[in-house]
Image (spheres, rainbow, N blue to C red):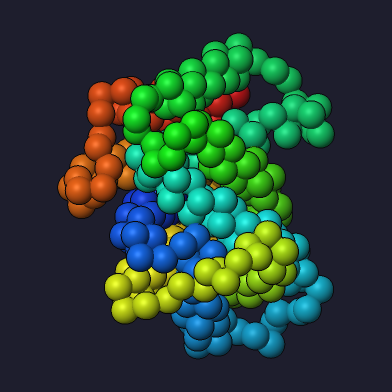
C-alpha cells in the first residue's frame, strides 16, 4: 500500500469528498443537515473501527498517542461537516465546494500569525483570487435557496477555517500513530460525541432527526464514501507533505462541478459564473500551496 504515492490518495480524497457531497445533496431533499451529520458519523464509526480492528496492530498503540485525534475530532469532521451540509442545503454543492476549497488559505494565514512565516507576493495574489471567487459567488442573483442567503456563505467559510486549523495537527498526529484507519476511527468517534452535544443546543427542534426511506440509502452511500475519503486523506498526510497533499485534496470543487452537472441538473444549475468562481478559488489555493 505504501507504494502508492501520496498524490493518488490526495486526489482520491478530492473525488470521494465531491461524490459524498452529491449523495448528501440528494438525501437532504428528504431530510436535514443534523440527520446527515449524525448518520454519516455513525456509518464512519462502524466502517472505520471494523477496518481498524482487522488491519491495525493494536498492541503497538497507546492511549496517549490517540489523544491528538480525539482533539481533532472536536472540530473535524463533525462540526465542519455540519457547517458544510448546511452550506449544501442552503447554497448548493456547486457553490459550497469551491468555498470549502479555500482551506489552505486559512492554513497559510494561521502559519503566518502563529508560526511567524513570511507573507509572500503569491500569498497576497492568491488571497485576492480566493476572495474574488467567493465574492463572485455571493453576487449570483436567484441562485440560492432563500432570499438574502448570501449570509449562508459563512457556513462553508467557517468550515474551511476549522479544517485549515486541523490539517497541521493531523499531520503531527500521523507521526505518532501511522495508521490511517485507526486515526480516522478515533476522530469520527470523538466527533460524534461533540456533534451530538452541539446539536443538542443548536438544533433545538422536533425535526432534528429526520430519517426515512427516501433519504436513508443516500445517507448510507454518503457515509461509506466519506469513510473512504477520510482514510485517503490520512494516507496522503502520512506519506506526503502537507503543502502538496492539501492543494490536491482541495480540487474537490472541480469534481463537484462535473458531478453536479451530470447528476444534479434537476436541483442545481452550473453556470459560467460558478465555473469561473471555482477556478479562481482553486487556482488561488494552488498558488498559496505551491509557491509559498
Query: At 60% from the left edge and 15% from the top edge, which residue is drawn?
Result: 124
Query: At 70% from the left edge and 18% from the top edge, which residue is drawn?
Result: 119
Task: Tell whether 163 sits left or right of 265.
Answer: right
Q: Give how far across and how far down residue 75 sits, in percent.
A: 68, 56
Residue 100 sits above or below residue 108 on the image: below
Task: Tell whether 142 sits left or right of 100.
Answer: left
Work out whether residue 73 can be spotted. Answer: no
Looking at this view, is 67 or 44 the one in front?
A: 44
Quadrant in which the C terminus is drawn = top right
Task: Tell whether 180 sits left or right of 272.
Answer: right
Name the quadrant containing residue 249: top left
Q: Give how far across and how far down residue 54 sits, in percent.
A: 50, 88
Quadrant in which the N terminus is drawn = bottom left
Looking at this view, is 47 or 271 the one in front?
A: 271
Q: Give how far across and how far down residue 194 sits, in percent.
A: 70, 67
Q: Give how far across and how far down residue 254 sits, in percent.
A: 32, 38
Task: Tell whether 129 sits left or right of 176.
Answer: left
Name the quadrant containing residue 174: bottom right
Residue 57 sits above or below residue 150 on the image: below
> How many discs appear?
0
Work out whether residue 84 can be spotted. Answer: yes
Query: At 73% from the left edge and 34% from the top edge, which residue is drawn?
Result: 110
Query: At 43% from the left edge and 40% from the top edge, which residue is drawn?
Result: 146
Amino acid at each position: 500500500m505504501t507504494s502508492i504515492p501520496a498524490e493518488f490518495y490526495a486526489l482520491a480524497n478530492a473525488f470521494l469528498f465531491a461524490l459524498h457531497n452529491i449523495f448528501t445533496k440528494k438525501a437532504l431533499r428528504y431530510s436535514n443537515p443534523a440527520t446527515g451529520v449524525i448518520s454519516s458519523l455513525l456509518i464512519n464509526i462502524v466502517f472505520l473501527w471494523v477496518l481498524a480492528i482487522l488491519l491495525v496492530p493494536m498492541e503497538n498503540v497507546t492511549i496517549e498517542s490517540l489523544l491528538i485525534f480525539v482533539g481533532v475530532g472536536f472540530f473535524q469532521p463533525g462540526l465542519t461537516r455540519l457547517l458544510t451540509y448546511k452550506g449544501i442545503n442552503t447554497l448548493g454543492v456547486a457553490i459550497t465546494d469551491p468555498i470549502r476549497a479555500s482551506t489552505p488559505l486559512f492554513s497559510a494565514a494561521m502559519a503566518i500569525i502563529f508560526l511567524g512565516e513570511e507573507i509572500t507576493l503569491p500569498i497576497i495574489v492568491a488571497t485576492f483570487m480566493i476572495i474574488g471567487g467567493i465574492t463572485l459567488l455571493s453576487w449570483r442573483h436567484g441562485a440560492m435557496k432563500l432570499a438574502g442567503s448570501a449570509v449562508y456563505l459563512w457556513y462553508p467559510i467557517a468550515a474551511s477555517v476549522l479544517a485549515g486549523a486541523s490539517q497541521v495537527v493531523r499531520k503531527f498526529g500521523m507521526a505518532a500513530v501511522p495508521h490511517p484507519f485507526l486515526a480516522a476511527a478515533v476522530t469520527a468517534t470523538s466527533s460524534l460525541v461533540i456533534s451530538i452535544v452541539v446539536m443538542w443546543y443548536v438544533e433545538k427542534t422536533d425535526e432534528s432527526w429526520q430519517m426515512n426511506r427516501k433519504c436513508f440509502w443516500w445517507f448510507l452511500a454518503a457515509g461509506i464514501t466519506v469513510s473512504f475519503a477520510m482514510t485517503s486523506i490520512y494516507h496522503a498526510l502520512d506519506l506526503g507533505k502537507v503543502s502538496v497533499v492539501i492543494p490536491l485534496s482541495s480540487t474537490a470543487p472541480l469534481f463537484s462541478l462535473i458531478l453536479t452537472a451530470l447528476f444534479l441538473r434537476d436541483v442545481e444549475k452550473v453556470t459560467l459564473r460558478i465555473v469561473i468562481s471555482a477556478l479562481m478559488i482553486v487556482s488561488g489555493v494552488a498558488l498559496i500551496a505551491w509557491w509559498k
